[in-house]
Image (cartoon, rainbow, N blue to C red):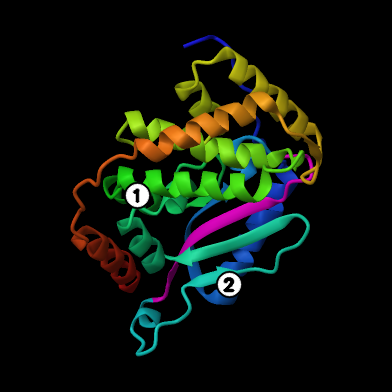
């Protein structure tokens, strides 16, 4: 591996953390739930936010026991109005566990985020261990490949492009490359992922140039297409389509049911 380093940054200002904490408190009180885990998702967690990037706060919550015993299930998502700074939403624990049993990459990324705003230490650790246990390499691979193809098709075909969209193609493509050679989930932070799977100095230099520009430019900043990145994306997409991992063994879901029951019933004691 070469010794070049990719730029990375994901600091959260104290005043922003305070506002997020207040919003999480409000959600708990208004919806009568307990937030077990809350983190940053999106570009600030991946390590390539623009100065005007918003804060994508995601959380997993637990409802009161009686609310799991209704004939008609309640809505299992809480979504707050989005403003220029905050985008906050969360999943009920039952929904999170259901998706975890399907090896949902989004949930795995939440639980691997480098920016955690709140967590019930024991429950968050158990949830993280369960989702890692149910990780399915083939499902994650197809998720990331599909994401890379979609973003490339929709955003990178013109002579000028939104610069951030290169990163929204490169990140899932590199995650797919990771999964062709490893059994575990790829890192959440883009720099960690890229440095683990990219041996090409020219490509790292091109990505660093893009990262530096994005970190000082706005979210909507556009620029000319970049030949070095375009060539890599074309070659990597073709390779990724040919070398998908085979399906692995699926795990029984009993452990997820037990965890949900333990979380719900523990509130009665």
Q: Residue at x 62, y 37 (%)?
A: 167
List the residue tagged with mark 2.
Answer: 29
Q: Nearer the viewer, mark 2 or mark 1?
A: 1
Q: Position of residue 228 (x, y in %)?
A: 64, 23
Q: Residue at x 49, y 37 (%)?
A: 237
Horizontally, residue 81 falls left or right of residue 92, namely: right
List the residue tagged with mark 1.
Answer: 139
In depth, the one of 164 and 46 nearer the eye is: 164
Numbered-mark total: 2
Q: Position of residue 239 (x, y in %)?
A: 42, 32
Q: Secondary structure at mark 1?
A: helix
Residue 165 appears anywhere in the view: yes
Horizontally, residue 64 falls left or right of residue 48, namely: left
Residue 121 appears anywhere in the view: no
- Specify whether residue 249 is painted magenta: no
Residue range corresponding to the magenta coloring:
50-64
Q: Secondary structure at mark 2?
A: helix
């Amino acid at each position: 591996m070469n010794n070049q380093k990719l730029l990375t940054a994901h600091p959260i200002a104290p005043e922003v953390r305070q506002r997020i904490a207040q919003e999480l408190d409000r959600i708990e009180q208004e919806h009568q739930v307990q937030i077990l885990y809350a983190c940053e998702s999106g570009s600030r967690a991946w390590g390539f936010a623009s100065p005007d990037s918003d804060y994508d706060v995601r959380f997993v919550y637990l409802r009161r026991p009686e609310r799991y015993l209704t004939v008609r299930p309640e809505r299992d998502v809480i979504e707050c109005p989005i403003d220029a700074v905050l985008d906050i939403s969360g999943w009920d624990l039952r929904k999170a566990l259901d998706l975890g049993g399907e090896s949902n990459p989004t949930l795995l990324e939440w639980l691997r985020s480098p920016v955690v705003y709140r967590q019930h230490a024991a429950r968050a650790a158990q949830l993280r261990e369960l989702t890692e246990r149910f990780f399915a390499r083939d499902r994650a691979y197809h998720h990331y490949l599909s994401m890379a193809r979609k973003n490339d098709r929709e955003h990178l075909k013109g002579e000028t492009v939104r610069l951030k969209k290169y990163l929204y193609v490169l990140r899932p493509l590199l995650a797919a490359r990771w999964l062709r050679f490893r059994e575990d989930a790829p890192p959440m932070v883009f720099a960690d992922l890229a440095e683990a799977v990219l041996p090409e100095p020219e490509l790292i230099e091109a990505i660093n140039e893009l990262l530096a520009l994005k970190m000082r430019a706005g979210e909507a900043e556009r620029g000319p297409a970049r030949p070095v990145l375009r060539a890599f994306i074309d070659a990597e997409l073709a390779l990724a389509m040919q070398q998908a991992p085979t399906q692995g063994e699926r795990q029984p879901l009993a452990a997820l049911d037990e965890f949900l029951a333990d979380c719900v019933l523990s509130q009665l004691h």
